[in-house]
Amino acid sequence: KAADKLATDDATLETLQARRGRKSQFSNKADRDRWLREEIARNERLIADNTAALAKNAKARADLEKAEAEQKAAADEAKKASKAAGTATSKDSSKREQLIKQRDRLGAQRRALWNETKAKEGAYRRSQEACDRARHKYEKAA
């Protein structure tokens, strides 16, 4: 929480310093407007990149979830076959353990991808907000 507040305060400070610097940075409105258009275009590219990354992560997460479900189904099937046979052979036991380990590994990967997706969604949201603020400033100035 303290680190988040510090990061937010730093971002606010940078924004205020940038705003103060822009007043002396531009000699006229045309220069400022050109800079704002470039910033908007840069933010839109960043948003597009983040959106593509989110889509890629969503597909990877779906693939992992599907693989995890398949592995769980395979583990359940192995368990049923073991019960039907009456005893679990060492081969079946090792296969089941392997499937459980693989399921656990895939679950960990899915959680990591989910965390990465959430982080990228946050970056996307912050980029969108920055773009919206820049547009608002541009429209207000125009």
Image (tube, grey):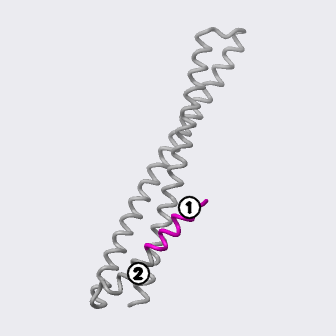
* Amino acid type, mark 2: Arg
* Amino acid type, mark 1: Asp
Range covered by the magenta-colored residues: 1-14
Q: In terms of sequence position, does the residue under pointer 1 or pointer 2 come before the other?
A: 1
Q: Quadrant of the C terminus?
A: bottom left
Q: Are marks 1 and 2 in contact (CB under 8 Å)?
A: no
Q: Nearer the viewer, residue 30 or 70?
A: 30
Q: Residue at x 38, y 69 (%)?
A: 43
Task: Relative to 117, say whether 24 is above or below.
Answer: below
Instruction: Look at the image and say whether residue 110 sits in the magenta stretch.
Output: no
Instruction: Look at the image and say whether residue 7 sits in the magenta stretch.
Output: yes
Q: Is residue 95 left or right of residue 87?
A: left
| Real-space CA distance between mark 1 and mark 2, rounded to the nearest whole angstrom | 22 Å
Report x, y in % for residue 94. 58, 15
**Quadrant position of residue 110:** top right
Q: Nearer the viewer, residue 104 or 71?
A: 104
Q: Which residue is mark 1?
A: 4
User: Please, what secondary structure does the residue beneath circle 2 have?
Assistant: helix
Q: Residue at x 54, y 32 (%)?
A: 105
Q: Nearer the viewer, residue 81 or 121?
A: 121
Report x, y in % for residue 92. 61, 13
- Report crowding for label 2: few under 14, some 14 to 19, many 20 or more residues within 10 A (C-alpha): few
Q: Is residue 140 left or right of residue 82?
A: left
Q: Residue at x 46, y 78 (%)?
A: 133
Q: Main secondary structure of the magenta part?
A: helix
Q: Quadrant of the N terminus?
A: bottom right
Report x, y in % for residue 13. 47, 74
Q: Which residue is mark 2?
A: 19
User: Please, what secondary structure does the residue beneath circle 1 have?
Assistant: helix
- Report crowding for label 1: few under 14, some 14 to 19, many 20 or more residues within 10 A (C-alpha): few
Q: Nearer the viewer, residue 116 or 84?
A: 116
**Quadrant position of residue 134:** bottom left
